[in-house]
Image: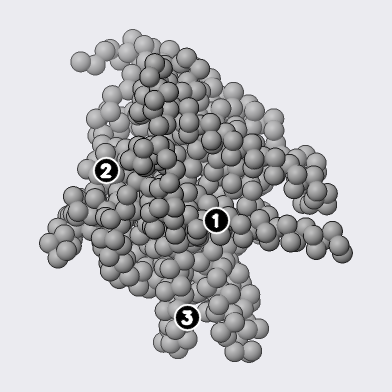
Amino acid sequence: MPGSQFEVMSASTFPYYIGLAGIVVSVLILIFSLADKNGDSITLSYLKTLDFKTTSYFVAAMLFYGFTIRSLGFIIATIIFLAIGFVLLKEKNVKRIIFISVGVSVGFYLLLNNVLGVYIDPGMIVEYFVGEES
Amino acid sequence: MMDGILQGVSTALSSYNIMMVIIGCFAGTFIGMLPGLGPISAIALMIPITYGMEPSSGLILIAGVYYGAIFGGSTSSILINAPGVAGTVASSFDGYPLAKSGHAGKALAIAAYSSFTGGTIAAVFLLFAAPALAKVSLSFQSSDYFALMVLGLTAVAAFAGKGKFLKAAIMTIFGLMLATVGTDSDSGLPRFTFGRLDLIDGISFLLLAMAAFALSEAMMNILDNKEQTQKEKDDLNASIGSLKITREEIKEMAPTVGRSSVLGFFVGVLPGAGATIASFLAYGMERSFASAKEKLKFGKGSIKGLAAPESANNAACSGSFVPLLTLGIPGSGTTAIILGALISYGIQPGPTMYVDNPALFWSVIISMYLGNLVLLVLNLPLIPYIARLLTLPKQLLLPLIIFFSLIGVYLVTFNTFDIYMMTIFAVIALFIRIIDFPMAPMILGFILGGMMEDNLRRALTISDGSLSFLWERPITFSILIITVVLLLMPLIGEVYDKMKKGKA
């Protein structure tokens, strides 16, 4: 920026020094962890107990939720997201899945719109069936 | 001061605000009980709800959630030996054995009474300490604030525990780095936005807190898929027993509670120390005070061993509000979240808050006390029923927690980019959790980053670009000396240990 050389502290000063501190601490961590050979680092057997598969499906479901919340509207997108979530975590009772996902999304929608006064777009599909609220 | 207190009392005692305390305590107890979810997540989940409220009501709700979450954490420590938060780990040492021997109700009652007493004593201290400190801090200048923030961030790393100093330090720096994303407040230049308009305003604190705590804690539960063991289920279904405490027991634990509360308060005031350290210190102190015969009881269901950490951690929670309310500098992850909430209500805590907004200042202190009362009077009798919620199946609970975290942030901006960003941050946070780096220093660094830069810039401008203010102002200089000492202590300790190991 013109004239910034006269400023005491420009926009890049603070990030620059934080970056420097980050480098110093990172190097220290590296040195200490290399010196400490028999330290208690995470083990492969611990990593093997972790359920990466379900978790990555969940991450995908969250991204999908972000993708659909506008196009499908809040209610439908939430029902789908919650149902996927329950199924991913191996809930077997279909009635329960439908009841909770529909109940939570419709209930939360009504609560927001009517009690808390926050308007969310219910989505084109819902509007088509219920009719646009005025 | 009297005017302020009276205003605060009338604000805190309005029927709406009392309702907020009660709702907050219940919600907090419930969330705090869930394994893995601590006060930070509980508060983060509540913040979107408070956006439509008056700042005082919002803050009162949050204070209720804070205490409720700590109490909920104690409950799960005592009943199923699964502390929801680090601050209640020490409570499980004697609380769980006590519950196993059929005195679960008694253990819960002891926890509630000691928490209440701890909270009460700390509230009285707060009543005197906060205004006094606020008056002193009115004479603080930007350079002093800058030094104080450096001290706060260093203290968090220094108190992180053995071998964790560098890990906490790098997380703090990571938080500071994230804070620089967005438009620079002085020059108006965009920084690290990758040309995206979504990042022009920087990363929202709520988004980061929610992703780093609530979301990633829920996802950690999915990743580390442990079924509730049969033993835990049995523990939950076992009858809780009588909630009564005898007069002898009260007499036995009274001195313990008194000592631990005072200790807890002062540890809480220290930046970076907080409830966890306070509860362990109090537990250790009581054990060393106990007679040889009593010492044997510790770890096997000693009443004192439960009362000490419980009163200390609650007192520390109140203590941690002192630097937040008077200096505007949070000393812990939880108070950092509360500071973030305050800023988003448009309130800058600090000495000026005490002067400009006395009703808010005092109503927070008074409602914190009310929160303690609600926990004792309403939550304790209901705890057998609330504890049943712990039997709710995880597969239903976790998707709901994730949904509420995502939607809580989305509802503020209505920007789908936020959902993507949260998901990405949650994945990063998950990775950081797996490699066992602490999360709280990051959020603290993030919250303090902007303020630190502003204060440094102001101090530099005042001193005409020279760094001389660092040693010319006595307050700044002494704070910095303390910082350096804190910084060097764990490093020297670590090097010393390594050398000893190397020789052996």
Q: Quadrant of the N terminus of chain A?
A: top left
CA–CA distance in space, label 2 to label 1: 32 Å
Residue at which label 1 appears: B484
- Check if mark 2 and mark 1 are on a common chain: yes
Nearer-N-terminus badge (3/1): 3
In the image: residue B53, left or right of residue B193 = left
Identify the residue at image location x=36%, y=29%: B185
Residue B415 appearing in the image: no
Identify the secondary structure beneath mark 3: helix
Q: Which mark is residue B310?
A: none
* Residue marked by disc 3: B256
Image position, residue B425 (x, y; %): 54, 31
Q: Position of residue B16 (x, y in %)?
A: 20, 50
Q: Is residue A31 above or below residue B87?
A: above
* Residue for badge 2: B347
**Do the residues bearing badges 3 and 1 touch, measured as CB atoms within 8 Å?**
no
Disc 1 crowd, CA 10 A, few/some/many (<14, 14-19, 20+): some
Residue placed most toward the observer, B220 or B417: B417
Q: Are marks 3 and 1 on the same chain?
A: yes
